[in-house]
Amino acid sequence: MAESLMDIKRRIASTKKTGQITHAMQMVSGAKLTQIEKQSNAYQLYEQKLKETMGHLVASKIISQYKNNNNESSKDSMSLDHLLKNRPIKKTAYIVVTSDRGLVGSYNSTIIKATMDLLRKNHQNDKSKFSIIAVGGTGADFFKKRNYDVAYEYRGVEDVPQFKTIQKLVKTCVEMFDTGIFDQLYICHNHHVNSLTSTFTVDELLPISRDIADEVDFQKIGNTSSYIVDPSIEVVLQKLVPQYIESIVFGSIMDAKTAEHAASMTAMRTATDNADDLISSLSLKYNRARQEQITTEITEIIGGASALE
């Protein structure tokens, strides 16, 4: 019985240490969440304005006018041509944003499961029809292990992402799209709703389609019938289109990181609560075992005294 009591005490001590660690990790994740939420909320305002501007341009026929009238032959113009013009879809790419580490609850599994469902729905899981661009080690390892075409992977996104971090990623994606490695690009990530909730989100990045105009409330931002463009449609679009794509990718990664920190905080809070519950259960078990041991010792003493009478 003494050995059993010692085992229980060791388990209690071990669980207390684990609970202290998970509580500390919960506090760290909470601090990171607070920090990134402020930046994410501020950035979403900029991203929304940029989306409205792009939707405004699409609805006002400026992009259509560019498509019809552009006769430039420069490298940049050809690249812009490819970004704006639809072409036959032979292969689709998906940017899948996951975490580089574990201890984030169901965060990664939710993204991967939803992405796999999307691939089965769109391509019947025919691996020749799509490529994966993995942001985060968990997703990269998952798809590579199952022999999916991982066209590019990016690991080590900061806890609070910086805009310069994603510029190489965006440049690589645009170059791959421009050279015809794929003809359509989506980004898949978890959208942060609140500390307890996130939802899987898919956004189409390339080519830029008429659908973005349908998302804009033109009653709030004015008439789309006329635009004065200076110095030219081409110059404006050369600046705006890459900026638009960068903003969507960066906003999605920022949003995904916010959801990751929230998931980590929730997972660590749950682990800490479970540790407290286990400590309570083990303490009760220890007290009962100790009481049983004392009762047995008293009974043995009484029995020994009775035998001497």
Image (cartoon, rainbow, N blue to C red):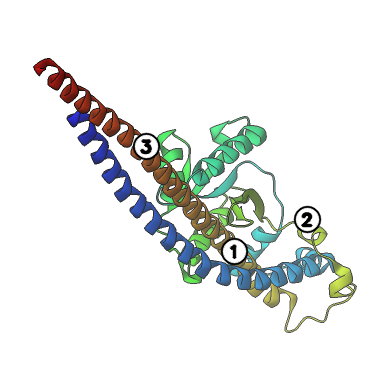
Relative depth, front residue between 68 and 274: 274
Earlier in the chain: of badge 2 and badge 1, it is 2
Residue 300 in percent (x, y) is at 17, 22
List x then y, in percent, for residue 32.
47, 65
Label 2 sits on a secondary structure element that is helix
Q: Quadrant of the N terminus?
A: top left
Q: Residue beneath label 2, please?
A: 211
Which of discs 2 and 1 lies nearer the camera? The answer is 1
Marks 3 and 1, how far apart in space?
50 Å
Q: Residue 150 placed where, x, y %? A: 46, 43
Q: Earlier in the sequence, mark 3 or mark 2?
A: 2
Label for residue 251? 1
Q: Is residue 113 above or below residue 160?
A: above
* On screen, residue 175 above or below 296: below
Given the image, on which type of amino acid does mark 2 rest?
A: Asp
Q: Quadrant of residue 120?
A: top right
Of residues 5 and 278, the one nearer the viewer is: 5
Task: Work out whether residue 279 can be spotted.
Answer: yes
Direction bottom: furthest residue: 231
Query: Residue at position x 75%, y 71% from top?
Result: 53
Q: CA distance from mark 3 to mark 2?
A: 61 Å
Instruction: Look at 65% across and 60% down and name the residue there.
Output: 83
Mark 3: which amino acid? Leu
Which is in the foreground here, disc 3 or disc 1?
Answer: 3
Count residues near mark 2 (Cα–Cα under 10 Å), then give few for <14, some for 14-19, many for 20+: few
For label 3, the residue is: 284
